[in-house]
Image (tube, grey):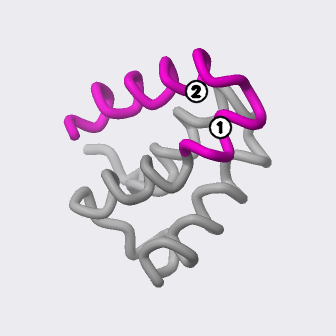
Amino acid sequence: MNDESLADRLAAQLSRYLGPNNARVAVRTFALKTIGCSPEQLQPRHLPQIFDSLKPMLNTLVGRQAAETALEHLQEEFGT
């Protein structure tokens, strides 16, 4: 059984692109800003909105092509 939260899993996947600290901050920030909840309250239904919100930041930090790759990977990983 996996006790890792959705937010932790998302941060772990994002850390490939942003590093672990920035990934955790991004998940926390976008959960609060986009969904209006704490990272612990994130549900799978929130992920499409989170991914849309992450796109501009990822474009800036890793470039458009890498951002598209990252978002495709996240969508595949989380089945969205």
Which quadrant of the figure contains the C terminus?
Answer: top left
Amino acid type, residue under disc 2 in the picture: Ala
Determine crowd level at label 1: few under 14, some 14-19, many 20+ residues with C-alpha closer than 10 A.
Answer: many
Determine crowd level at label 2: few under 14, some 14-19, many 20+ residues with C-alpha closer than 10 A.
Answer: many
What residue appears at the point 55 percent right and 42 percent down from the top-left corner? Answer: 55
Residue 60 part of the magenta segment: yes
Secondary-structure class at tag 2:
helix
- Measured as percent of width and height from the top left, residue 66 is found at 61, 18
Secondary-structure class at tag 1:
helix
Residue nearer the viewer, 32 or 49: 49
Label pair 1/2, CB-CB below 8 angstroms: yes
Find disc 1 in the rendering and name its residue: 58
- Measured as percent of width and height from the top left, residue 40 is found at 45, 72
Find disc 2 in the rendering and name its residue: 67
Q: Which residues are magenta?
A: 55-80
- Measured as percent of width and height from the top left, residue 44 is found at 25, 57
Q: CA distance from mark 1 to mark 2?
A: 5 Å
Note whether 80 is above or below 41 in the view shown: above
Horizontal arrangement in the rendering, residue 53 relative to residue 77 (left or right): right
Amino acid type, residue under disc 1 in the picture: Leu
Horizontal arrangement in the rendering, residue 8 relative to residue 29 (left or right): left
Using the rendered view, name the quadrant where residue 73 is placed: top left
Using the rendered view, name the quadrant where residue 2 is placed: top left
